[in-house]
Amino acid sequence: MKEYQEVLYGLYDDETDLMDAVKVANADHLDIMDVYSPFPVHGLDPLLGLSESRLHIAGFVYGALGTLTAFLFMTWVFTRDWPIIFGGKPYFSAPAFIPISFELTVLFASIGMVVTFYTVCGLGPGVNNPVLDDRITDDKFCIAFETNGYSNEEISKLKGFFSTTGASEVNTKTI
Amino acid sequence: MNQFTFEGREKSVLIGGMVLGVVCLALSFFMDASPHSGEYHSRFWTNFLHNAVFFTGIAFVSLFAICAAITAYAGWYAVIKRIWEAYSMFLVVGLVMMGIIVAGLWGHMHHIYHWADAEAVAADPVLLGKSGFLNKTSYTIMTLGFLSVWYFLFARPIRKMSIMEDKAGTADYAIHRKIKIYAATFMPIAAFSSCAVIWLWTMSIEPHWYSTMYAWYTTASWLVSALALTLLTIIYLKSRGFLEDVTEEHVHDLGKLLFAFSVFWTYLWFSQFMLIWYANVGEETTYFKTRRDEYPVLFYGNLIMNFGLPFFILMRNSTKRKFGTVGFAALLVLFGHWWDFFYMIKPGVIKELSHADGAHGLLPSVAGFDYPHLIELGIFIGFLSLFFYFVFNQLTKASLRPERDPYYAESIHHHS
């Protein structure tokens, strides 16, 4: 059984209008479901009360894992499993291992972060992501409220908020 | 407060530092155990060259940073551009300092450069082949010529026009456009001329050895030092109540550059090292083998201070925004890159001096060449004081807020 959400959203023409509207919504204690914008708007995160992403911590762990994997694997191969002399160098040639350790650091960190990001956001192949309005990927800035079970009075209050803050368009959608 | 004032207390501290530097330079003239010290005074001359090259380079790279920012239409740096302008004016002192090295070269007062020894060159096919570039005349012309071009044709006019901009009624784009022409002209000239002087000033100390990465590597070292010094200057000026417009956003960006160019420096260091280590060609490997086996403190200390520590300290977002941690990292890296120049210059001079005497095998361990002793640290403090005395004096000559810069408003609202 799929759960449906009724959403009331307003579109703004400009990012500064959006920022002002979010400030008004915070002052009126309106419960914003989400804000959508075609590009990252500076200063929006603290207004929405979003904490700093912890993705980079995961990135560091993956990177360190990549370094260790490459370095230890090469050490094992060239000292234990299949020692070969390259250009008269010792079996354990740390400087020669560094470029590959670096590559694997980058590889592990990038792939690990992509996978983590997709998992955390619930994205992936076959996932249906309803888009409120096509223009929020182009030139419109959107504030959305979830209105499941809202009374007419509450909905008209939200509509009043949109008209006072200068939204160019207000729509409802069930997703 | 827009107008910097050079307080008497600062003056006396900096003059004290300079006196310490002079005393230590004099001590290094007499307390010298290097070969032929009575004749060549290598400890004194290498200390002088080391610091002269280090601080001249900081001045040069600051000018380059201004020009790069202007040419790239960058706005964020406008609130700190007076600091870089003041740094770039230090090129005139660099001209004098390198002029002293040139005078010493002609007067046979020092033996930093083995290629200046005519008898040795005549008997050495390698040096004979390089003598078209490595000779006293080209050293003199390029050192004095390029430094004069940098200072008289670029640093001074750019500074002058930038101050002129302050007096214009509104944001004067005509002046800015003119600065932009100077800036864009300077960059290619700087790129080629800096390579040539780096080869002459430091790489030619070991004239048989060469590396195509050396100029990049040295310039990266200068750039990191200049960024570290900029951060320290900002933190100091803010503690005195100046530079209200410089926020943690600007410090954050400088911290990012410090982090990025520390890694860049390491990349160049490692690329230079690994290829030579792997190829294992005798005349190339000797540079690193000597340093790693006989100067391990210099060799590993260099990597720890300039890569290991700043990499982990500056990695997190928050450490780049806190004045305490970023200031500590800047201090560490500044000293680290001073150490890097020590590592480039000092062992090479000892090596050439002993080889000229026909010695082979391990080099003699000589005080003041193995690692920075107290005398060397005193000289560093002396040159640092001279640098800051000059810079603070320059800062008094113009407002710290270049409000007529077309990018000033953008810079105030900078968000990193």
Image (tube, grey):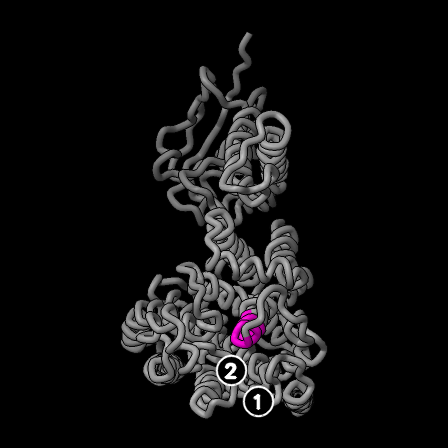
Point out the residue furthest to the right here: B374
Whether residue B43 appears in magenta in the rendering, the answer is no
Indicate the position of residue B50 as horizontal and vertical percent values: 55, 76
Bin the neighbour count of mark 2 within 10 Å (Cα to Cα): few under 14, some 14-19, many 20 and up: many
- Secondary structure type for disc 2: loop
Q: Are marks 1 and 2 in contact (CB under 8 Å)?
A: yes
User: Which residue is depicted at the point 47% across and 78% down?
Assistant: B113
In the rendered image, which quarter is residue B118 located in? Answer: bottom left
* Residue designated by label 2: B111
- Parent chain of label 2: B
Q: Which amino acid does label 1 sit on?
A: Glu
Q: In front here: B162 or B266?
A: B266
Which is more N-terminal, label 2 or label 1? 1
Disc number placed over residue B211 in the picture, else none: none
* Residue designated by label 1: B39
Whether residue B353 appears in magenta in the rendering, the answer is yes
- Secondary structure type for disc 1: helix
**Cα distance in 3D space between marks 1 and 2:** 9 Å
Quadrant in which the N terminus of chain B appears: bottom right
Q: In front here: B46 or B379?
A: B46
In this picture, which residue range is highlighted in magenta?
B348-357
Point out the residue furthest to the top here: A1
- Parent chain of label 1: B
Indicate the position of residue B10 as horizontal and vertical percent values: 66, 87
Above or below: residue B273 compared with residue A71:
below
Q: What residue type is labelled 2?
A: His
